[in-house]
């Protein structure tokens, strides 16, 4: 009896040990989802997607829902570890319907069964079982059949990814349909929440964007999946993913995609027995040898375009809209943008064929579009078409180069191509200069996109800096300076300082204006030492244009107390018009509350700097900054500064427009008209340092942060006299063409398996022209700058399953004009000056289209349109005596309004 009791005690101890070890193994597979042996799990599954405007209501969205039943069984569990499982997932009873139940009779799915909507082959592939190998709750491998349609396989990946989870809290990286993503789990008693950081997901997808923040797109994405748990078992999975985006520049161009998934357990019943074996590969082979391991990460697919026109057919249908007389209309830009999208899928031969057969009137616009497409095929085609050794296509060559300079996402190959062209021969020296100037613009854009170390960029830097160091001809020095003005290389600053301080007038002026474009961190104390020497003429006499630019740079870049004081003390000792100009600059900084205003106010507390004699200087030169538009998140500003010679002839006018959004800025445009050496015409005495200047007048333009090749009105006294005798007052075109200014393309892999595309484009037709009139008889000069433009911005969001697509198209457009006129009467001193800047009234139209479309062609479309007239505006340029302009120089009949002042 005693022996029996001992044996029972030993058995009890062994039993307790067994139970203890069994409990540990059960606890082990609580790390992730675990299925019971020999059971069939019957679930329901649905994925739905909504597409709408940024702040639109969910019930007003377009979209669709794909629903089904799902059977899940555990095929195999590793005998050496319960958390190593192979499960089979089978989709059954598929249905497709609207998410908007109010569609009713307008539903594109009404009367159609799933096999017609999805197509028979796709439906069969969708309902073939897939296998999922899970280890500790994470996907080790995903198995499917070869040659299944990618879009259908993605839907299966979206469902399979829901089975990946862990029960414990923590942050880790997981690979699922969205890519390799950082995820955070938050465990609770009755649920587990998984938050996926979508911006961390590493997945290869085509796309590009504009690097400038003002013209760029802001986006926000979230993904939250909730696993509901009951009695230690997951009974439901709810996932929601949201993508919202908006154009920074125009917030009405905004949209949102909401994707939802729901997987819910309905019943369990007896299922097949576990398959025995130690290796998962043997089990898979036994199930079906046709199974292949494929990535769980979503794959790229393209939907077929049925009935789409060829490139040639599309061009024939739109080319009349791109005739020169139609370019001021928004319809021209709409067609320009759509054609670019078509060009991006075209082959070189197709593009080249159109270029070779088109008439000369629309060829410049065609060159704009082909270059803006920015694909290898479009670049090869345009390079084959253009002959830089011929002067018969100079206009087309210039349009090609400008389009390269405005490229939204240039690549290394484009830069390499231009470097190669520059080393070749040219029929036109102007084109050679333009090539180098645009090389500078591409260097800056590539560096902004973290491409400064690319081989072609390094080569281009050496070309610019080396060329500037070795240049002997004045024309070459100017060309390389203009390239550096675009590239803004920090290592080029010493060279710019050298030319600014020691160069001849035009070279010195160009070097200082190049320095003016650098950001504040690059204008160091050493740089400002040189600029102070230039302004105060410590080493040599400089032209007024150079000195005033140097002073402006100092004042705009954290000036010290003594720097401000010395500039203020110089006022009164300068030539008359320069006195007035510098005084206007100081007053403009104070009035507009620019960063230097605090330091200037500190200095002005000293009577030696702030007295009536200094602040009562007369003259006609001026500087003024104002707002075009202002909102809590953005601002548009304009500024105009005009410097005259002591004899009353225009020396320089500088009109700038900037756009600011957050900390980002865009130099929208700058139009500078310069003149010199004209005093002999009215027998006047030149100012100090300007006695030997050649007669010259020209115009320089910066557009969207890109310096273009300057245009010369005349150069030399004989050229001036011949043009005065023969020229009319017709303006000279400086920039004319179609520009792709906003270009954002993004493909999203939704975790449901659906594909989303976001495309935003903005284009404009622009015509900037300038004229300078000079009358000895009336002793009057007039400069005129006119800017005509049409702008279209469009956004397109689509969510595609390959058999049904939902989308939103939103756009805005306008046609506008702005004109700046300065008139000077120099028959007396102080001479009379009238400045006017007018913006004519302009239409502003907005369009919205929502649609759902089956691949078979059936669709639902809803359209909205808004239109309003934006009244004309007058912008004060010197508001103290604004009415005097209207008395002496009445407003032009065609102007909407005018503003200005005598002073």
Image: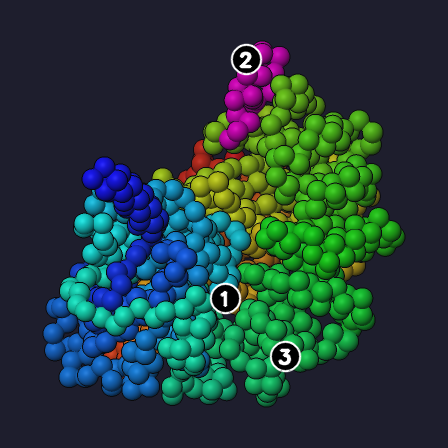
Q: Nearer the viewer, residue 459 or 788?
A: 459
Distance of label 1 from label 3 (alpha carbons): 22 Å
User: Measuring 50% from the left and 87% from the top, which residue is drawn there?
Assistant: 312
Q: Is residue 290 left or right of residue 588?
A: left
Colour setting:
rainbow
Magenta residues span 594-616
One can see residue 833 in this view: yes
List x then y, in percent, for residue 805: 31, 74
Distance of label 2 from label 3 (alpha carbons): 65 Å
* Secondary element type, mark 1: loop
**Mark 2 or mark 3: which comes first in sequence?**
3
User: Measuring 58% from the left and 11% from the top, which residue is drawn there?
Assistant: 607
List x then y, in percent, for residue 275: 34, 70
Determine contact: label 2, label 1, CB under 8 Å.
no
Q: Which mark is residue 605?
A: 2
* Secondary element type, mark 2: loop
**Mark 2 or mark 1: which comes first in sequence?**
1
């Amino acid at each position: 009896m005693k022996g029996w009791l001992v044996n029972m005690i030993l058995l009890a101890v062994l039993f307790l040990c067994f139970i203890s070890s069994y409990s540990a193994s059960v606890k082990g597979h609580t790390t992730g989802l675990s299925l019971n042996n020999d059971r069939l799990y019957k679930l329901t599954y649905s994925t739905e997607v909504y597409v709408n405007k940024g702040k639109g209501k969910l019930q007003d969205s377009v979209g669709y829902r794909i629903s089904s039943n799902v059977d899940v069984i555990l095929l195999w569990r590793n005998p050496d570890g319960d958390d190593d499982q192979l499960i089979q997932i089978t989709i059954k009873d598929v249905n497709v319907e609207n998410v908007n139940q109010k569609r009713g009779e307008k539903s594109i799915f009404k009367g159609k069964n799933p096999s017609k909507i999805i197509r028979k082959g796709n439906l069969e592939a969708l309902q073939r079982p897939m296998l999922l190998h899970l280890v500790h709750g994470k996907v080790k491998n995903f198995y499917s059949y070869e040659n299944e349609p990618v879009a259908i396989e993605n839907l299966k990946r979206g469902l399979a990814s829901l089975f990946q989870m862990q029960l414990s809290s923590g942050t880790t990286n997981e690979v699922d349909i969205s890519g390799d993503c950082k995820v955070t789990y938050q465990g609770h008693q009755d649920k587990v929440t998984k938050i996926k950081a979508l911006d961390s997901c590493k997945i290869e997808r085509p796309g590009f964007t504009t690097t400038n923040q003002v013209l760029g797109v802001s986006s926000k994405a979230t993904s939250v999946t909730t696993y509901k748990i009951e009695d230690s078992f997951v009974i439901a999975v709810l996932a929601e993913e949201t993508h919202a985006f908006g154009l920074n520049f125009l917030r009405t161009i905004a949209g949102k995609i909401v994707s939802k998934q729901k997987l819910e357990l309905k019943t369990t019943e007896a299922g097949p027995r576990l398959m025995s074996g130690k290796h998962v590969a043997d089990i898979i082979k036994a199930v079906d040898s046709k199974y292949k391991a494929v990535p769980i990460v979503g794959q790229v697919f393209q939907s077929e375009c049925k009935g789409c026109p060829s490139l040639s057919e599309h061009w024939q249908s739109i080319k009349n809209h791109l005739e020169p007389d139609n370019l001021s209309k928004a319809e021209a830009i709409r067609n320009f943008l759509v054609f670019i999208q078509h060009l991006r899928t075209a082959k070189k031969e197709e593009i080249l064929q159109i270029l070779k057969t088109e008439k000369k009137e629309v060829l410049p616009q065609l060159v704009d579009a082909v270059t803006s497409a920015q694909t290898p095929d479009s670049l090869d085609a345009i390079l084959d078409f253009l002959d830089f050794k011929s002067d018969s296509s100079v206009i087309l060559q210039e349009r090609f180069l400008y389009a390269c300079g405005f490229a939204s996402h240039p690549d290394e190959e484009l830069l390499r191509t231009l470097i190669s062209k520059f080393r070749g021969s040219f029929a036109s020296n102007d084109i050679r200069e333009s090539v180098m100037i645009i090389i500078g613009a591409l260097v800056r854009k590539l560096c902004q996109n973290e491409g400064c170390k690319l081989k072609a960029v390094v080569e281009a830097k050496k070309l610019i800096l080396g060329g500037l160091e070795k240049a002997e001809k004045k024309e070459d020095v100017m060309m390389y300076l203009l390239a550096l003005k675009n590239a803004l290389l920090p290592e080029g600053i010493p060279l710019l300082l050298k030319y600014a301080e020691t160069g001849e007038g035009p070279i010195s002026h160009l070097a200082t204006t190049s320095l003016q474009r650098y950001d504040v961190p690059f204008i160091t104390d050493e740089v400002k030492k040189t600029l102070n020497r230039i302004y105060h003429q410590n080493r040599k006499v400089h032209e007024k244009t150079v000195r005033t630019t140097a002073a402006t740079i100092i004042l705009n870049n954290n000036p010290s107390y003594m720097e401000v004081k010395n500039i203020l003390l110089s006022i009164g000792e300068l030539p008359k018009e320069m006195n007035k100009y510098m005084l206007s600059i100081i007053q403009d900084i104070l009035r507009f509350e620019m960063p230097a205003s605090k330091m200037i106010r500190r200095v002005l507390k000293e009577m030696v700097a702030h007295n009536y004699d200094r602040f009562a200087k007369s003259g006609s030169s001026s500087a003024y900054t104002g707002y075009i538009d202002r909102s809590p998140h953005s601002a548009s500003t304009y500024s105009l500064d005009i410097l005259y010679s002591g004899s009353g002839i225009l020396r320089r006018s500088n009109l700038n427009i900037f756009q600011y959004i957050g900390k980002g800025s865009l130099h929208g445009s700058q139009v500078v008209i310069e003149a010199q050496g004209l005093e002999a015409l009215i027998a006047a005495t030149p100012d100090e340092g300007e006695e030997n200047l050649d007669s010259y007048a020209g115009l320089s333009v910066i557009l969207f942060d890109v310096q273009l090749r300057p245009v010369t009105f005349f150069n030399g006294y004989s050229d001036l006299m011949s043009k005065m005798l023969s020229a009319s007052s017709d303006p000279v075109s400086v920039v004319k063409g179609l520009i792709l200014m906003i270009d954002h393309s993004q493909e999203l892999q939704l975790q449901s398996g659906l594909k989303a595309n976001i495309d935003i484009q903005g284009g404009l037709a622009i015509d900037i022209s300038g004229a300078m009139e000079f009358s000895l008889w009336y002793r009057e000069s007039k400069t005129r700058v006119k800017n005509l433009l049409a702008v279209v911005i469009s956004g397109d969001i689509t969510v595609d399953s390959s058999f049904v697509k939902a989308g939103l198209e939103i756009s805005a457009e306008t046609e506008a004009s702005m004109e700046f006129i300065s008139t000077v009467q120099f028959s007396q001193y102080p001479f009379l000056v009238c400045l006017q800047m007018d913006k004519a009234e302009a239409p502003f139209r907005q369009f919205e289209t929502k649609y759902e479309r089956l691949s078979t062609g059936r669709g639902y479309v809803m359209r909205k349109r808004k239109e309003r007239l934006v009244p004309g505006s007058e912008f004060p340029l010197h508001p103290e005596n604004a009415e005097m302009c209207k008395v002496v120089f009445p407003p032009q009949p065609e102007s909407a309004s005018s503003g200005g002042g005598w002073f």
